[in-house]
Image: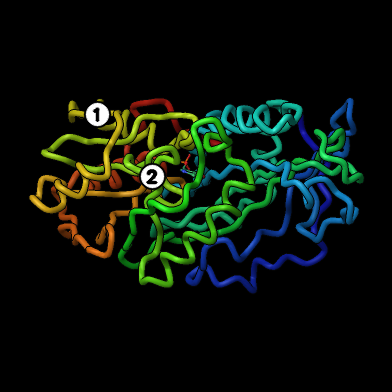
Amino acid sequence: MSFPVRHTAKSRLSETDFNHLPFGRIFSDHMFQADFNGQHWINAGIRPYAPLELQPSSAVIHYGQSVFEGMKVYRSAEGELLLFRPIENFKRMRNSSIRLSMPLVPEDIFMNGIMELIKVDANWVPSGDGKSLYIRPVYFATDPLIGVHPSELYTFLVITSPTGAYYTSELKVRIEKTYSRASRSGTGYAKAAGNYAGALYPTQLAQQAGYNQVIWTDAATNTKVEESGTMNLMFVINNVLVTPSLSPSKLAGITRDSIIEIARHWGYPVEERDVFVDEVVAGLRDGSVTEAFGTGTAANIAPISVIGHEGEDFTLPIPTVESFSTKALNFLDGIKTGRIADPFGWVVKI
Ligand SMILES: *Cc1c(COP(=O)(O)O)cnc(C)c1O
């Protein structure tokens, strides 16, 4: 399917400084929108990025019935536009929307909406230096009534934002044992808006204490590490890649899955299992934890330099060219940007 395009009267491209791209602040000229009227998908098309009109009673504003996705398109050295595993984002948004009682966005609208939008805003895809165009699909309830119920009306939007590297400085994280991101039976596995609102306060407390992010622990016992901020979490312990196994309280990251696949492809030992706070702290103390890093689309791989636990800070070795995280980042980034041949069939050319 191809969608009608309404072009902007005045492009902002020439006034955008592609050498200074703070994450998530600059948006391309156009967006994709499709609405669900309770029965059908209507109004699907590309239009100028602009404020929306919403009723003050819109369901999403009151009860947060909203899910989102995040993916990136890269420009290869040959100038091709490359998407990374977009079908996985589609599947995940479907799972997220089921958990929030939302009708499924058709695959055609999700995939082709994104593809067509990128074609229209192709000049917004930066090149080089880990730069990319971040793609943000978001899907939310618009019923104009404030009873608590699944909405009948919805809007699906895709906006895009040119971006450079996510974490530019060192990453200090603190193991969080008071507040939780998600419970075993909650919405943690969904990319649901409310999960992120609830994470802000504990993160702010960690930032006031001098950290960038928290490491979330399980809500039931606070003894197992789960994720870090909005990234999945991995360690290298005695030369084994160790990562918390997936569960309903964790977001199944596409980057996480890709790094596990890469490690297996290399014959590097991988363990997906419970990872206990005590084990991590002991391993930081005796040096058997040699690497810790977050994984996610926005950051790719973000090496952690300091882990705080109950007032004590543990400093990790600075990654070298030999570190797993360095090699994995280089390989993953190479595949995403077309610099390295993709052995997995992950990359989709636009
Ligand atoms: C999006 C997200 C991730 C990373 O997922 P990717 O598919 O790798 O981008 C990890 N944890 C949380 C909580 C997230 O929202």
Give the position of the C terminus as an image quadrant: top right
Which residue is found at the position 37% from the left and 33% from the top? 258
Which residue is found at the position 34% from the left and 68% from the top? 169
Residue 310 in the image: above or below residue 270? below
Residue 305 horizontal side relative to residue 343, left or right: left
Q: Which amino acid does label 2 sit on?
A: Thr
Which residue is found at the position 80% from the left and 33% from the top? 150
Please indicate, yes or no, whether residue 78 appears anywhere in the rendered image: no
> Which is nearer the eye, 289 or 258?
289
Looking at the rendered structure, the secondary structure element under dot 1 is strand
Image mark for residue 167: none
Q: x, y percentage for residue 317?
A: 15, 58
Find the distance from the CA under tag 1 to the CA under tag 2: 18 Å
Residue 162 horizontal side relative to residue 13, left or right: left
Q: How is the image coloured?
A: rainbow
Give the position of the N terminus as an image quadrant: top right
Please indicate, yes or no, whether residue 33 appears anywhere in the rendered image: yes
Q: Name the residue under label 1.
A: 271
Q: x, y percentage for residue 311?
A: 27, 65
Task: Indicate which label's residue lies in the foreground, 1 or 2.
Answer: 2
Looking at the rendered structure, the secondary structure element under dot 2 is strand
Which residue is found at the position 33% from the left and 35% from the top? 244
The image quarter in which residue 243 lies: top left
Q: Name the residue under label 2.
A: 217
Q: Which amino acid does label 1 sit on?
A: Glu
Residue 135 horizontal side relative to residue 164, left or right: right
Residue 66 in the image: above or below residue 177? above
> Which is nearer the eye, 345 or 87?
87
Using a 10 Å C-alpha cutoff, classify the residue at mark 1 as few (fewer than 14 neighbours), some (14 to 19) or many (20 or more): some
Q: x, y percentage for residue 322?
A: 13, 48
